[in-house]
Structure formats: C-alpha cells, structure tokens
Amino acid sequence: MRRSPASVDQPATDKSAGKWAFLSGLETRLAASATPQKTFLESLRQGDDELARRFDRGERVAALVHDRARLVDTLVVSAWQRNLGSDGEQFALVAVGGYGRGELHPGSDVDLLILVANDIGDAGDSLNNFLAFLWDIGLEPGHSVRTVEQCVSVAGDDITVATALMESRLLSGAAVLFEEMREKTGPSGIWPSEKFFEAKLAEQVKRHHRYHDTAYNLEPNIKSGPGGLRDIQMIGWVAKRHFKVDDLQQLVPLGFLTTGEYRRLHAGQAYLWRVRFALHRLTGRREDRLLFDHQVQLAKQFGYRDGPQNLAVEAFMQRYYRMVMRLSRLNEMLLQFFQEAILLQADPEPKIINARFQSRNGFLEARSANVFTRQPSALLEIFQILQQQSGLRGVSATTIHLIRRNLRLVDEEFRANPAHRKLFMDIIKAQAGVTHELRRMNDYGILGRYIPAFGRIVGRMQYDLFHAYTVDAHTLFVVSNLRRFALPRFDHEFPACSEIMQSLDHPEVAYLAGLFHDIAKGRGGDHSQLGAEDAAEFCTAHGLSQHQSQLVAWLVRNHLLLSVTAQKKDISDPAVIHEFANQVGDQSRLDFLYLLTVADVRGTNPKLWNSWKASLFREFYLRVRQALHSGLESPQDQEELVANHQRDALAILREQDHINLPADSTPLPWDSLGAEYFLRHSPAEIAWHTGVLLRAGDTASLVATVGDREMRGGTPLLVRAIRRQDSFAVATAALDDMGLNIVDAVISPAGDEGTLDSYLVLEHDGQPLRDQHRQQEVANRLRRVLGSDQATPRVSRKAPRQVRMFSTPTRLSFSPDRRGNGTIMELITGDRPGLLSEVAQALQAIDAHIRTAKIMTIGERAEDVFFITSTGGGPLSEETQELLEQRLTDALNRH
C-alpha cells in the first residue's frame, strides 16, 4: 500500500551540471591528430588529472562521475569513427552497465556492446583494431559482439545481462538496431516486471549473504555490500522496469518516497560516490573494498583527526557505517513497497488485530496514519505484536515509514512513562522473538531513541582485527547468542550453556547484561564501569528488584573478568581459582558470568572463537564451581590435586588394553616429573603422555607425537627432548611455519638433561587437526628439526595482509609467580609468524626457561603470558628482567 503522493521541491539534478570546458574541441583535436595513440592517451590522462583537481577543490562528485563518462564517450566514439569510418554505421556501438548510466569513477569498468545485424562481414579487422586501440590508450574495455537475437537469448537466461542491457545507451551507429534490442529485451519481450523483481530480490539476498548480511564488516565493500551503491541501483532497476521511471526522484509523486527520503537517498549516493572516487584515486585502480590501510588514508584525506577518545579512522568509519545503515533501511523499505505493489494482492481485506493495528498480505500495518501521534505507546506495542503473532511476515513499508517519521515522540517523557517501561520489559521477557524484535527496533531507530546511550554506539567501530562488528551489531549478536542458550532447539550447540540458561528463573538479567555490557564504549574512561552505572539506573527504573539490578550492573562491570583470567592466568593454580571464586562470590553470579562470557566472545569475531576457548572457559567454570561448592574458607590443597590427577590418570591407563600396568604400580615415566606437571595437565593428558612414553621405551630417545583425539578443544602434541635446551624455540618455529596456531604450551623438566613439552594446537581456521596425514606430517617435521643439530629454523610464512596494517608497540611486565618458584612475564606486541620462537631464543640467551606459555591472540595483537624460571629453577633477578625487556623490545620492535 503506497503513501499519498507528495509535492516535490525539485532539486537540480547532477546530470544538468554545466559543460566541462576541457571537452570543448576535444573531438576535433582527436580527429586531426597525426599521432592518435599518443594524443588519445594524453587526453585521457589530462582529463583524469583535471577531474582529480576538481575533486580536491570540493566540486560535487556527481558532476565528476558524469563528466568522466562524457570524457570516455568522446574518446570511444572518436576511436570508433577513426577505425571504422562509414562501416561503423552498420553496427550499433552501445555503452552498457554503469557506463550506460553515464556514471564512471576513475577505475570503473568501461563496458561496450557492439550490436550487429547478422555478422560482422569484412569489418572484423577494423573492430579488432578499434578494441586494441582502446586498450592501448588505457581504457581496458569489457566488450561483447552480438546480434539482437543473441542479446535476447543471453539476457533471457541471465538476469545480470538483462539488467545491463536495460541501462544501455547508444554511443554511435545504427539507432534502429539499438531500439530493436531495447524493445526485445524489455519487459514485453523477456523478464516481465514480476519475474524481474523476484530475480533481482533473490540476487540481492544472495549478494548480501556473501557479506554476512551486515553492512558492518571490518573491510566493507562500497559497491556490493549491504547499504552500498548496488542497493541504490537495485531500487532504480526495479523502478525503471515496472514503474517506467528513469530517476529515483520520480518515485516521490508516485508515493513511494517522501521528499525527505529522496534527499537522504540522493545524499547517501553522493557520499558513497565521493568515498569511491577517492578510493579509486588512492589505489590507482578499480577497488571497492575499504581495506584497513585505505580507511586510515581516506580518513586523513577527508579531514578527520585523532581525538582524545576516538581515532580519526574510527570517526570516519562511524559516519560510513551510519550512512550505509540508513541506505540499507531505505532499500529495505522501498523493496517492500515494490513487493506489495508488484507481487501481492492489491488492497486485500485486512485482518483486524486491535484498535491500532491490522495485517494485510501477512504484513503488520497501522490502521491509521496518526496512530502513533494519538497513542505513542504503539511505537513499542508494534514489536510486541510481532512477537505474539508468529504468522506475520514483517511490517508494511507504509508503517515502517510512519515509525521513522514519529521517532521524535520517543523522548524523555516517553521513556519515563511506566506503561512504556513495562512494554519494553515485556518484549525482553517474551518467550519468542526477543532478538528479532531488538534488531528490528535498532533498524527502525527505536532502540537508540529509547536507550539514548545505545544510540551513541550505533555504527561505532574499533580499528582493530579483534572486533569484527560495530558496537551495536556486536551487542545484538551477544543477546542473540544468549537467546540461543535459552531455546531448546539450539541445545546441540552449547549443551552446558543451554542447561544453565534454561534453569535460570530470570533470563532477562542475562539479556540486559548483554545489552549494556559495551554501551559506554567511546566515551572515555572505563567502559565497564560507566556501562554498569547506566545498567543499574535503567534496571531500577524498569522495575527489576534491587538484587537483579545489582546483578546486571555487576555483570556489566565484570564482563571481561572470566575471559581474561582464563586466558592469562594459570588456572591450574588453586590460589588463582580461590581468588576468582572470592571475586564472584556465589554460584548464581558464576553462572550468569559464564553465559555472558561465552556469548560475548562468540559475538566479537566468529573467526576467533574456537573449540579450545570453549573448552578453556568450561574447564575454568567447573574449577571455580567446585571451589564454591567446597567453601571459600577451605581452598583445595595442591598435594590433594596432584594425587587426584594421578589417581584418575591411572584409572584411564588401566582401562587401555594396549598398556599393561600392575594394579599397584606407579608408571615409571612419572618419577622424573614434578608436581607442576600434574597440576598443569588433565588426567586424560597425563594418561596419553604416559602411554606414549611407555611405548617409546628408551628414556634417552627423542619423542615427537601428535594425538589423534581432541583434548581440551585442541590437538595435543608431545615432545620429549633430551640434552636440548632450545626445544621450545625449535618446535614452535616449525609448528608456526606449518600454519598451526599454538594455544597452550607446558614445558616440564624431565630429569637432569631433558624436558617433556606438551602443546595444544589448532589449524589456522581454528579447527583441530583431524586429518591423519596432516597429523603425521606435523610429527615428522618435529622429529626432523628436533633430531637435527642445526640452529632454530626460520619461519618463512608471511603475516596476513590485515595484520601487517597495524603496528603494536611491544610492552613487557614482570611479576612473581604466586607459587614462589618463578617469574611471570606478560608480553603485548604485534602478532606475527615466529613470535613464540623469538621469545624463546631471547630467554635462552639469558639462561631463562619457559615452563608454561598462555597464548592469547586478540586480532592483530598478541597478549601472551610466560611462566619462566632461571637456570637454577628460581625467579629472574631484577637485573635479568631489565636485560630481557631491553632485548625483547629491541628485537620485536624491529619488525
């Protein structure tokens, strides 16, 4: 159902811009040139240089885009006439695609169609010379030579070709042939408007899916990503095919757009064109991806400067994301209008839902245009109805427009209304549709109006590789992850989390903690503390009990606590577990924090979540839960833990037929291993290590084995190195060079001249090693490098392009190992291949040894923790720490 037509203040279109003086007389100069290739080439370069100067002067980019198409028109037509002469009149030289629209950026494709009546006859050589000449002068055209019948056939099979032909423009030659092609490839010939719309809609859905259905990608595609230029073109194509309009402005009198919406669409296109024009200039080619290094340079070019709270690139990208989100919303609304107008039954009898809403063709719509002004609560009620009426397909385009037009009603008075607060909490507590409606509220602009702090994080990005989404998109992913724990149909994903979530009396506490956990990012100060204050105020105002409000605030304040502790501290240490249990205080807080942590890390970057992190968080959660159950006044004894691990490992060994152990014996390989080994490995790992060593026999032999079963979410490796102090440096270099990620390492002294080194590794995609040939390849490589007398191998693997875009200064800090027998070294530096090996070599140079390594990669940044000892087994002296810090900082900062 369309809106009533509105009067339009006609803005001057960009195509009506004045003539470009550079083009005056160009055609004559080209025709008269005695050195055509040089003249054409220089004319193209000079024209592009002049367009660049106009861009730098701030001229409207639309004029530049159209003028570049005019420049290319002049060159192409002059080349056509020079090479074909009168023979060119039997053909039609046609511009198609973006060139057909008369829109060319510095690196845009120049796509040509040469229409022929039957065959090219004797003009084949002339056509080839024409195309070769265009390549010689730097235009690099895409081209096809077809008859009208061939155009009809190909376009009938391929909606992309049909779309390109729909935008075709005659440059020179047989107008009759061109018009015949246009008629036969039009909606009366192929692709009637209904089929055309369905095909283009499916094409857009598929295209958006390639970009994860979000405009908020780290390196977005200006042209093809959601909210990009292709979405604007999509609207134009459908409007042209079905409504016979050549300009989006003509949709205003038809009632599909208001004047304001058209202006926003026009401004959005101009903004994206300006960014794209600058990007093509920057790269010197067609490049539509806003890569990290391009973002920094464009931010500077567009006048952004680093501030106390945000980098220039973050401010630039926030504007970009907000613009494409606005365009994406307009695209969605217009396509829904078109769907209702083209595909659905015209004005069927509506189904009345209540006094304010009804459904028509499965879409929820307001019963009157003033429903929101008469009853502002309907701005929230509509989302509750969508939760309750599962048969609804969405909101009608007319009503979406009404919502956005009435956003101003969501003000301080609206937010303070008890009825509105209850409505919002009912949406949060609903049995179904919580995530869907929160996302819809964000898309329509309601969520940012109702929670102003949320509005400030919309489109906010963080310039790093760790955060894959803007803050608002990440926040809603976290809530979505929490909701999946609550729904039995997703129990298979995280069974333990689902069991905990579904046992909670008030799951809305978790949803609110997820909604507020990052809400204060970008303000300066501690976002966890500031967000906790916002959360406490919101929860109290919305009727949560004092206990629930305090719990939400505590979760927001401490939402990083479990993740950081598990990944950076020695969770085999009973004192670490006891301290964390004291911080948490009770089982309820632990349950909520565990759920929030898993949901948060999963929603930060899907590429960085893996089975090892899932296992690590689960193991830590269980250890803390056991400490809480045992009582905070009686922490578990270290000797008791060692005895328990040995007992459980023996039980596992005795169940294995291929290992023959007397019932009352202790396996001999344990004799040379200290308590640290048994504390830092699970019983399953100890049993596997023991079996490997017993099968190896000779205690003086090299052992390098890859486990065929997953342990703690990764693939286990075991190395026994004899009389080799550089085993960690050598092994990590080899593993790194093979593209493996080392996520955990424990180096245990095993007698006077050897170590027992255990590693957990993952493939580069975050998966364990499951292929037997790959496992054997890794084991063979380890045996070869560790069995050789050669120096530590070089890592030849290059860092990924994205990682190389960032520079992270090296920082080291030292603290005493709480067990009193070593030093903890925390290293923050840029991640790179061979990093662990470099650290090990620096330690070896000062006679220090790694006992445990906790590997934590946060996008482009490594935050690793090493538990190290001196040669004699004690902590490093202050002098040694200073020497190590200097050597490592110098070595790592050279990269």
Image (cartoon, helix red, strand yellow):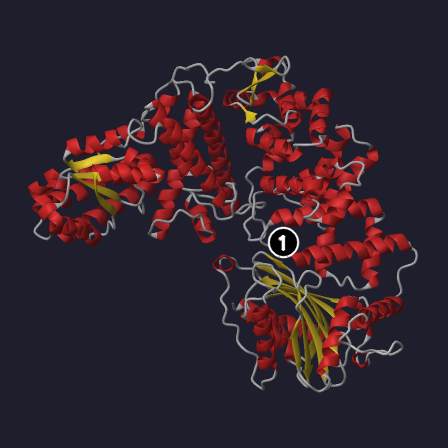
Q: Quadrant of residue 632?
A: bottom right
Task: Identify the residue at horizontal 79%, vertical 64% (top origin).
Answer: 572
Q: Position of residue 338 (x, y in %)?
A: 43, 25
Q: Is 396 positioned to the left or the right of 552 in the image?
A: left
Which sits in the foreground, 163 or 708? 708
Residue reaching furthest to the front: 657
Q: Is 766 positioned to the left or the right of 143 in the image?
A: right
Q: Is 720 positioned to the left or the right of 402 in the image?
A: right
Q: Position of residue 124 (x, y in %)?
A: 13, 49
Q: Which residue is mark 1?
A: 609
Q: Is 605 positioned to the left or the right of 30 in the image?
A: right
Q: Position of residue 254 (x, y in %)?
A: 39, 18
Q: Position of residue 199 (x, y in %)?
A: 41, 34
Which sits in the foreground, 248 or 94? 94
Amino acid of disc 1:
Trp
The relative height of residue 267 versus residue 221 in the rendered view (above or below) is above
